[in-house]
Amino acid sequence: MLEDNNLATFHLHLLTKIIDVQKFPFTKLVIEKNVSEEEYQEIFSILEDMDLEYKEQKDEGLLDYSSHLVRFAGLLNEKLDPTETIYALRKEGHFPNLLEEFIRIIKKDGL
């Protein structure tokens, strides 16, 4: 089993050298930080819920989403840095409106 794991790790290392990881920064983070499949799914589940809530509240006229950013940072797996993760997810095109809002807050507040 350990030999299979080492082989998979080696192959993954080789793949990251030939794939343009600049286009997939979140995927690179997931690999580098050893995020499990369950943890990966949890991140997207959190984001899906927050994106739905963001859209509803945006339609209702809410203007400040700082508390959403704080909540996301608190719910995010401790293996990942919130700011780095937000920029990486946006670059891959996930939840563009929500993540753009988070980035606007980060830039405004200097986080």
Image: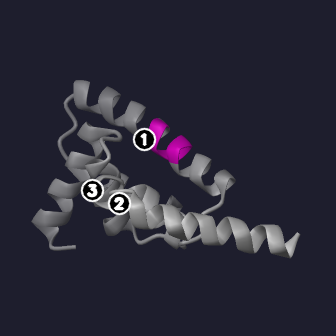
Residue 71 in view: no
Indicate whether residue 57 is drawn in magenta. no
**Which residue is nearer to you in this view: 57 or 11?**
11
Kind of residue sitting beneath label 2 = Val
Kind of residue sitting beneath label 1 = Met
Task: Mark 1 or mark 2: name the one nearer the start of the chain.
Answer: 2
The residue sitting at 54% across, 70% down in the picture is 13
**Which residue is nearer to you in this view: 8 or 22?**
8
Residue 22's x, y, as percent? 28, 60
Q: Give the image quarter of residue 67.
A: bottom left
Task: Mark 3 or mark 1: name the one nearer the start of the chain.
Answer: 1
User: In this figure, which residue is indicated by the disc labeled 1?
Assistant: 50
Magenta part mainly helix, strand or loop?
A: helix
Residue 68's x, y, as percent? 36, 51
Figure disc tally: 3
Decide: few, some or many residues near mark 2? Use Cα within 10 Å; few <14, some 14-19, many ≥20: some
Indicate whether residue 45 is drawn in magenta. yes
- Which mark lies nearer to you, 3 or 1? 1
Task: Mark 3 or mark 2: name the one nearer the start of the chain.
Answer: 2
Residue 24's x, y, as percent? 36, 54
Identify the magenta region.
44-48
Residue 24 in view: yes
Image: 45 above or below 22: above
User: In this figure, which residue is indicated by the disc labeled 3?
Assistant: 66
The residue sitting at 29% across, 53% down in the picture is 23
Q: CA distance from mark 1 to mark 2?
A: 27 Å
The residue lying furthest to the left in this view is: 108
Image: 59 above or below 79: above
Q: CA distance from mark 3 to mark 2?
A: 30 Å
Say whether marks 3 and 2 touch (CB < 8 Å).
no
